[in-house]
Amino acid sequence: MIVFERAEGLTKYIELLKAKKHTIGFVPTMGALHEGHIALIEQAVSENTTVVVSVFVNPTQFNDKKDLENYPRMPHDDFEKCENAGATIVFAPSVEEIYPEPDTRLFDFGNLDKVMEGEHRPGHFNGVAQVVSRLFSIVNPHKAYFGKKDFQQLAIIKRMVEMLSIPVEIISCNTVREPDGLAKSSRNLLLSKEHRASAPLIYKTLTEARNFKGEKSVKETIKWVEGQINADTILKVEYFAIADSKTLEPISNWTDTNEAVGCIAVWAGKVRLIDNIVFNLK
């Protein structure tokens, strides 16, 4: 496995590999790799000749400086995990390498980035689009792999690729979970023992809510989910929304769409956890 810190060297190396008919798979990460990331890397390895993993904590997608400062960083451990998973290349750039000049681009995603995460983290998805588009321009992959846990982010990236006509196939991969159902996340490392014990309630509640089709209205389902989780005194729902899975527009009735997604953000102390569940309504 090769580690690149400079964009120019990586781009030139990938050009050589493409000349040899290599297919390039790409897994962008912010490090602190867990089994969810490993699953993405392993899928990329199974489908491509060469796999690039980026390890870069992107400052432009954080609207809370403390969150950026506290984000877990363990690069050497990450490199070892990448190699063990079969990655060919790790790209670990500095902030200056990704942003030699301030990135002032503003993306218009319509309402896609205004709801749910976008409403509660203004500017977040613009930062995601900035860094992912920049990474795509450096790596020039054939395929890029993203987890469904970040459901709204996945929708944003797909829209960005269309808007910018980037020739990359976006591969969405299933959420990887702990045995107790908690979605794998780098932020889980920051949970206290007590909050970690309560956190599985999030997915348990979402799973139960998925069985309510025809029994409770959309409004009643939202109220029930919020009530179940908030009943745990150390968890606090920031939002729970049920929306069309493609447009992310909130729905009022189950008949408004064939497939809805329930997206949630929950505070476990000072750690913010997100998850989602898909309601197949056909």
Image (tube, rainbow, N blue to C red):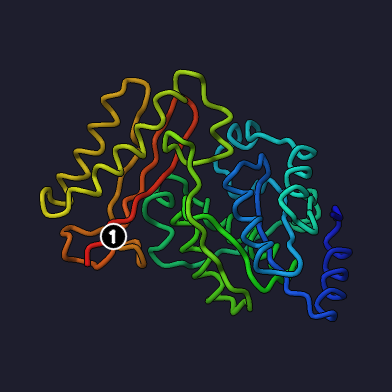
Q: Along the horizontal axis of the image, is 50 left or right of 270?
A: right
Image position, residue 265 (x, y; %): 39, 41
Q: Residue at x 78, y 75 (%)?
A: 22
**239 in relation to 125, above or below:** above
Residue designated by label 1: 260
Quadrant of image for the C terminus: bottom left
Looking at the image, is 52 positioned above or below residue 264? Answer: below
Q: Quadrant of the N terminus?
A: bottom right
Q: Is residue 56 left or right of residue 244?
A: right
Q: Secondary structure at mark 1?
A: strand
Vertically, is 65 above or below 61?
above
- Left or right relative to 125: residue 110: left
In front of the other: 165 or 212: 212
The spot of residue 269 in percent (x, y) is 45, 24
The answer to which image quadrant residue 278 occupies is bottom left
Q: Residue furthest left?
A: 215
Q: Nearer the viewer, residue 32 or 113?
A: 32
User: Is 279 left, or right, of 187 in this rendering?
Assistant: left
Question: Label 1 is placed on what type of residue?
Answer: Ala
> In the image, what residue occupies the spot 12% across and 48% down?
216
Residues 97 and 20: in front is 20
Residue 118 picture location, percent across and down:
43, 52
Locate residue 198, reporting x and y percent. 39, 25
Residue at (49% x, 30% y) in the render: 271
